[in-house]
Amino acid sequence: MAHQMSNEPVKDTDPTLGKLVMDAQRDISSLISKEIQLAKSEIKVSVKHGGVGIGLFAGAAFLGLLAIIMLSVAFAYFLHWNGDGLDLHWAFTVVFVVYVLVAALLAYIGLRQVKKVKAPERAIEQGRQIPQALKGRP
């Protein structure tokens, strides 16, 4: 059997090649725009976690410095208690160890916050699928 072309006239409602190309360009532009919006929203979340982590590191450093300089002497003399408590050198050692532990705790919490910073993984994966979708592959 020979294949015959349809002799039906082209209707005004049938899309033209130009219209199909314009529709495809619009859809691709919209898809890329949505991918950019997704990446921005994912980056905002990561930047927030990074900012909190950096703030906690700064807090740890600031508290460590102030504590060692300003409060160490007062606490050491409190432990010494006018000679009735620990010897003065042990009192200063105890105060130093306490402040190092507090600074280490703040640094640990800050590190956990910084580790939550991630790349916009969903947007990257979807962006990798665009060329395949344009070629007609799922």
Image (tube, rainbow, N blue to C red):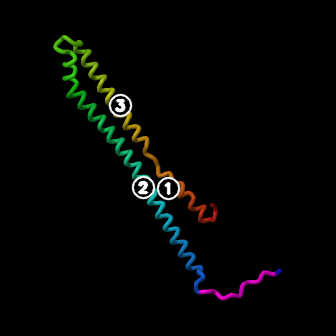
Label whose residue precedes the other's in the sequence (2 or 1): 2
Q: Which residue is mark 3?
A: 105
Residue that extends furthest to the top in the rendered view of this protein:
84
Q: Where residue 123 is drawn, which disc sits there? A: 1
> How many angstroms separate mark 1 from mark 3 (CA)?
35 Å
Label whose residue precedes the other's in the sequence (2 or 3): 2
Q: Where on the picture, by quarter, is residue 8?
A: bottom right
The amino acid sitting under disc 3 is: Leu
Q: Which residue is mark 2?
A: 41
Q: Is residue 103 above or below residue 24?
A: above
Q: Give x and y (percent) for residue 113.
A: 39, 41
Q: Give x and y (percent) for residue 54.
A: 34, 42
The amino acid sitting under disc 2 is: Ser
**What's the magenta bit mostly, secondary-structure-wise?**
loop
For the record, the magenta segment spans 2-11
Tell me whether the residue at label 2 lies in contact with that at label 1, contact meaning CB atoms closer than 8 angstroms: no
Q: Quadrant of the N terminus?
A: bottom right
Circle 3 Cα neighbour tier, 10 Å, few/some/many (<14 / 14–19 / ≥20):
few
Residue that extends furthest to the left in the rendered view of this protein:
82
Task: Check disc 3 and report its element: helix, strand or loop.
Answer: helix
